Amino acid sequence: MSLIQSLKLVIAPPHPAARPFLLASGAGAVIGRLLPFRATRWLGTASGLFFGFCLYFFRDPERVTPAEPNLAVAPADGHIVSIEKVAPPPELDMGDAPVWRVATFLSVLDVHVNRMPVAGTVTRIAYHAGQFLNASLDKASELNERNALRVTMKDGRQVAVVQIAGLIARRILCDAEEGMQYETGERFGLIRFGSRTDLYLPPDVTPVVEVGQTMIGGETVMARL
């Protein structure tokens, strides 16, 4: 990655979900520095640091999605922590036949915007309350708080994308609604402060990525459909 590309990734404009955090921390930074008290100066410094962290964490860079059809791309930035055959989430009514699940772990340093892995229609959304275990653990897929989406492609095949909260992440944001149509790589949500995103591929589709590989949401090809 070139220096210019790296700078664009870091200084990208923030996602709209950052607004309340930026407003609160920005106000705290200004007020804390203006008031003539030592305690408020500490508050101002802390608020200013948090403001900078939010600018970095909520950054929302533009991505160039491959134009080739019949590809499944990464739904999130991060690195792959597991690739295994398991049954799809039961709440999505996709049957119990094992399919490939590719799990991507997002640290607090990764871009946390979720992107649609394939073009299709959101035909089911199911929220499941749960725990807040370390999202890199395998059991996080079943035990943690999560939001699952079933996406039906034009040929009738289905994929599942699951937003999973982690040890620090406590808020899953999903802009998608049932019936909405998406193109590959379009934004559909965000998870705050560390998380995991699982992709369940259609039957007989094999991932072309490996455990430990770094993902770029909306760009890295995960499978050929």
Image: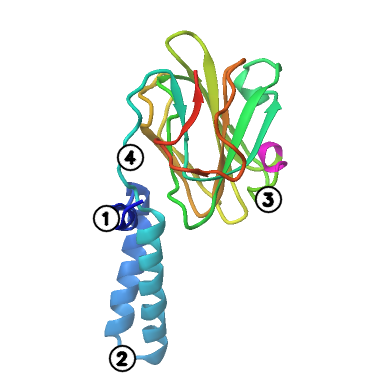
Q: Nearer the viewer, mark 4 or mark 3?
A: 4
Which amino acid type is shown beneath numbered disc 4?
A: Arg
Determine crowd level at label 1: few under 14, some 14-19, many 20+ residues with C-alpha closer than 10 A.
few
- Packing grade of label 2 (10 A; few <14, some 14-19, many >=20) is few
Q: Amino acid at mark 3?
A: Leu
When the figure is inspected, residue 135 is found, relative to residue 37, above or below; the finding is above
Disc 2 residue type (three-letter): Pro
State the separation of the CA atoms marked 1 and 2. Answer: 41 Å
Whole-number angstrom distance, CA of label 4 to CA of label 3: 30 Å
**Dot 4 corresponds to which residue?**
63
From the image, state whether disc 2 or disc 3 is nearer to you: 3
Cα–Cα span, label 1 and label 3:
36 Å
Element under disc 1: helix
Q: Which mark is residue 95?
A: none
- The segment highlighted magenta reads 138-142
* Foreground residue among 223 and 33: 223
Disc 4 crowd, CA 10 A, few/some/many (<14, 14-19, 20+)? some
Q: On the image, which quarter does residue 30 sit in?
A: bottom left
Where is mark 1, residue-wise? 4
Could you tell me what secondary structure mostly forms the magenta stretch? helix
Residue wearing tag 3: 133
Of the numbered discs 4 and 2, the one sitting upstream in the chain is: 2
